[in-house]
Image: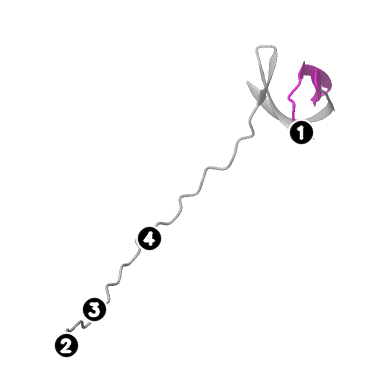
């Protein structure tokens, strides 16, 4: 399996043509307006793949401190 980022040569409602190395490959329309796509090539078949994203960084979590204000409530009669 080989994955490459390929430039889009033609993209319309019916087909998309990409440049995969020295070959022009026609695939069904990706229906997106993009300049490049990630293509998987395996066993003679070309498929559009999602771009691999960087792993999400874990957000540092903090506990919210709660403060309780003491008020002096006295009743006067």
Q: Which is closer to the viewer, label 4 or label 3?
A: 3
**According to the image, label 1 marks what residue?**
36
Tell me which label, 1 or 4, sits earlier in the chain: 1
**Residue at left offset 20%, top offset 81%:** 73
Instruction: Specify whether 54 is left or right of 75.
Output: right
The picture places residue 60, in percent across and down from the top left corner, at: 43, 56
Mark 2 is surrounded, within 10 Å at the Cα level, by few (under 14), some (14 to 19) or many (20 or more) other residues, namely: few
Determine which of the numbered discs, if any, sits on residue 49 in the image.
Answer: none
Give the side of residue 48 with respect to residue 58, left or right: right
Give the residue at x 27% y 73%.
Answer: 68
Q: Which residue is mark 4?
A: 62
Q: Which residue is mark 2?
A: 76
Which tag is nearer the camera, tag 3 or tag 1?
3
Label 2, label 1: how many angstroms apart (C-alpha)? 78 Å
Closer to the N terminus: mark 3 or mark 1? 1
Secondary structure found at label 4: loop
- When asked about the image quadrant of residue 1, the answer is top right
Q: From mark 4 to mark 3, how far is it between C-alphas?
A: 25 Å
Q: Is residue 64 magenta?
A: no
Q: Which element type, helix, strand or loop, lies under badge 1?
A: strand
- The residue at 63%/30% (across/down) is 50
Badges 3 and 2: C-beta atoms under 8 Å apart? no
């Amino acid at each position: 399996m080989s994955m490459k980022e390929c430039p889009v040569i033609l993209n319309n409602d019916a087909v998309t043509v990409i440049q995969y190395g020295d070959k022009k490959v026609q695939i069904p329309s990706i229906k997106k307006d993009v300049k490049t796509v990630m293509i998987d090539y395996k066993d003679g078949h070309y498929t559009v793949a999602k771009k691999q994203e960087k792993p999400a960084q874990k957000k540092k979590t903090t506990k919210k401190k709660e403060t309780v204000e003491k008020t002096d409530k006295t009743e006067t009669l």
